[in-house]
Amino acid sequence: MDDRAVLGRKGERLALRFLRRKGCKLVTRNYRCAGGELDLVLLDDEVVVFVEVKTRTGRTHADPEDAVNLPKRQRIIRAARYFLQQTDSFDRMFRFDIVAITREDDGELAVEHFIDAFEPAD
């Protein structure tokens, strides 16, 4: 596994711990389907939360959340629709969150949680 993949996995673990501390419950991680991939699927009370995790070593080029551009959001939305269909959950409320993790200059990882970061119409 290359350094980028290792950092990404570490970021996903950190994001999951962070969201669990906020009361979310894990449904699945790294869900893959014909439509794409979902990093984390959680329940926040009764709301299904589709979480995209972006981890970066710094903010030199851009903030991690900026990497969730329109084509990426469209893939996430397609995968989420597939997930809702496969789990017969279309009647449930859902949202799309982004967790941006950045390695600071001191080596610590900073976590930012963007709740309801984008809409399915994007």
Image (cartoon, rainbow, N blue to C red):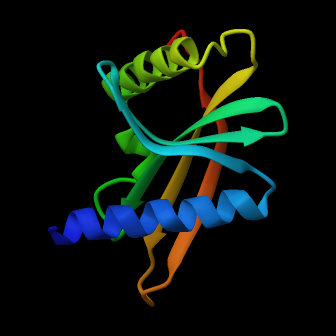
Q: Where is residue 76 in the image (x, y as percent from the top left)?
A: 43, 26
Q: In this view, does 14 lie above or below 99?
A: below
Query: Measured along the vertical axis of the image, is residue 25 above or below residue 84?
Result: below
In this view, which residue lies farthest toward the front? 87
For residue 93, side relative to residue 14 (left or right): right
Residue located at (59% from left, 59% from top): 16
Q: Where is residue 23 in the image (x, y as percent from the top left)?
A: 81, 55
The residue closer to the viewer here, 101 or 93, is 93
The image quarter in which residue 120 lies: top right
Image mark count: 0
The correct choice, above or below, for 89 with respect to 30 in the image is above
Q: Where is residue 110 in the image (x, y as percent from the top left)?
A: 55, 71
Q: Residue at x 35, y 53 (%)?
A: 62
Q: In which quarter of the image is the N terminus?
A: bottom left
Q: Give the vertical position of 46 relative to 7 (above or below).
A: above
Give the farthest residue toward the bottom.
106
Q: Which residue lies furthest to the right in this view?
A: 45
Viewer-proximal residue, 63 or 23? Answer: 23
Q: Foreground: 64 or 83? A: 83
Residue 103 location in percent, x, y?
42, 75
Q: In this rendering, does residue 56 appear at all?
A: no
Q: Decide which of 98, 32 is in the foreground and name it.
A: 32
